[in-house]
Amino acid sequence: MESSRLIQTTHLVFLLLALSVSYVHCQATRVGFYSKTCPRAESIVRSTVQTHFRSNPTVAPGLLRMHFHDCFVQGCDASVLINGPNTEKTAGPNLGLRGFEVIDDAKAKLEAACPGVVSCADILALAARDAVVLTNGPNWKVPTGRKDGRVSLASDTSNLPGFTDSIDVQKQKFSAKGLNAQDLVTLVGGHTIGTSACQFFRYRLYNFTTTGNGADPTINPSFLPQLRALCPENGDATRRVGLDTGSQNRFDSSFLSNLRNGRGVLESDQKLWTDASTRSFVNPLLGSDAFNVQFGRSMVKMSNIGIKSGTQGEIRKVCSKIN
């Protein structure tokens, strides 16, 4: 009888330990992580982003995209910030990233105020949120407490979503990071701010098909002349074009409305509407309020991918190099 109770108690202890380990793992980040160790951390990041945004508004979409690209490779650990040969920063998908100077500036200010306390990964997560707020987007509470990673390899960037990806491939890449179709549609909706270069979508405008006008048939015929005027067949491949026509500097749900109307610029974006499995997630987000609420939720979820904590990471002194 006593041995039976002992076995039951032992099992219960192991179960509680397992649950507590799981809980701690899930709680690696929390809102207000720096409330005692660096109380001004979030306000320092916010004011730094505001200063840079006032002189160069393109840093807003740049910071949002950088956070996304960071989280999809090695998790949200600021590995995308590291300089050097064959680092993530040198990979094709990351060559157009902008806003590194904002993170460096915020880090310098934080090191002056609270040396060795605030991670570069947290600075990037906070800066992405602040960038969205500055473009009239939603505000949300960002859990902090990430450590910075020590590995950054260009070869690891192959799992970043691409502009020609099918919906199945997009879903697969998001699912591998613990994100579902709702998160996919919502986070791609972040394209409501920002631009793309002609080289990434011009192939849709000319000789895409051998019938009709030669363009991708999912492009609204009334939108085609506008895109062709911006990106002539033999024109400047690096010219930037807004991904959310008519509202590229304002964070809202008009990007999703444009997809509904066949006015998506990137092929992978337009597929969110033409594929029935993702269209069902686009429809409920067509109002800005619903989109804003879901965007904050999906951003928090994404920002917790592959978190480094404890001895898994470090607090870099300079964001562009490992200690």
Image (cartoon, rainbow, N blue to C red):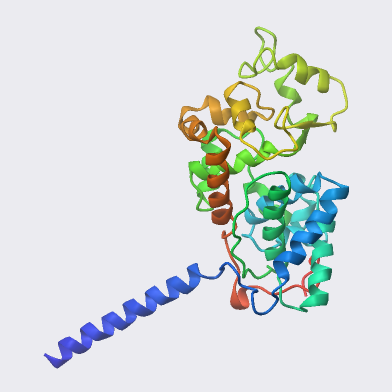
Q: Name the spot of residue 40 as percent of width and height, x first.
A: 72, 71
For the point 51% across and 36% down, which residue is it? 168
Point out the image quarter for the C terminus.
bottom right
Where is residue 200, by image quadrant?
top right
At horizontal 79% and vertical 67% (from top left) the residue drawn is 107
Residue in view at x 80 percent, y 44 percent: 96
Choose top left, top right, bottom left or bottom right for residue 6: bottom left
Residue 231 visible somewhere in the drawing: no
Whole-percent x, y for residue 202 in the image = 76, 24
Q: Position of residue 177 (x, y in %)?
A: 54, 53
Q: From the viewer's side, name the closer residue of 244 and 97.
A: 244
Left or right of 114 in this view: 31:
left
State the residue lying farthest toward the left.
Answer: 1
For the point 67% across and 10% down, the residue is: 210
User: Quick one: quadrant of the N terminus?
Assistant: bottom left
In the shown orientation, is residue 280 left or right of residue 250? left
Camera-side residue of 242 and 95: 242
x and y, in percent, of residue 165 in the image:
61, 35
| 90 relative to 253 in the view: left or right | right
Height in image: 2 above or below 8?
Answer: below
Q: Between residue 114 and residue 68, name the one nearer to us.
A: 114
**Residue 16: in sight, yes or no?**
yes
Q: Splitting the image into 4 quarters, where does residue 248 fall?
A: top right
